Image (spheres, rainbow, N blue to C red):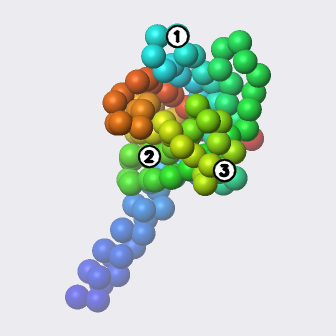
Amino acid sequence: MSRILHFSLALCFGLVSCAPSFKGVFEGAGQIGNDRFFSFTLDTERRTVTWQESNQGQEMLALCDIVQNKGAVSFSIDLDSRAKTCEEMKNPYRFQGTLGRDVVTGEVSDLNGRVVGRFRALRHHE
């Protein structure tokens, strides 16, 4: 019985350690609506996002409510009020996606939960 327990624990720890993690820096792009194109760099450790929309300069915003549940990830960014901290957020967009080894793809939802766009981000390796 002891051998089976040890084997089961080793297998569980091995599987957990091999699962992709939503940590690090991700560079991506996407679209909200028909005419709002964007690019971004997420830094999940610093909880910041460098945000840039077409015809606008880069801006550092807060990356909040980061959740990872197995292969699903989600996070919030307040694009309208340009919140620099999570406490300043008023109308955040929710980014929800599926995490692969080095890529996240998903949808962007407004405050009411209505899907308004899509995004894709790749893990940045240094």
Disc 3 versus disc 1: distance between alpha carbons?
27 Å
Q: Earlier in the sequence, mark 3 or mark 1?
A: 1
Residues at circles 1 and 2 in contact by the CB criterion of under 8 Å: no
Disc 2 versus disc 3: distance between alpha carbons?
20 Å
At label 2, which amino acid type do we have? Answer: Val
Q: Mark on residue 35?
A: 1
Residue 35 or 28: which is nearer the viewer?
35
Instruction: Count the labels in the image.
Output: 3
Q: Mark on residue 85?
A: 3
Callout 1: helix, strand or loop? loop
At label 3, which amino acid type do we have? Answer: Thr
Closer to us: mark 2 or mark 3?
A: 3
Q: Mark on residue 73?
A: 2
- Pick out the residue farthest to the bottom: 2
Identify the residue at image location x=58%, y=31%: 80
Q: Earlier in the sequence, mark 1 or mark 2?
A: 1
Q: Earlier in the sequence, mark 2 or mark 3?
A: 2
Residue 94 or 40: which is nearer the viewer?
94
Give the image quarter of residue 100: top left
Callout 2: helix, strand or loop? strand
Disc 1 versus disc 2: distance between alpha carbons?
25 Å
Is residue 119 positioned above or below 34 on the image?
Answer: below
Identify the residue at image location x=50%, y=45%: 75
Left or right of 112 on screen, residue 79: right
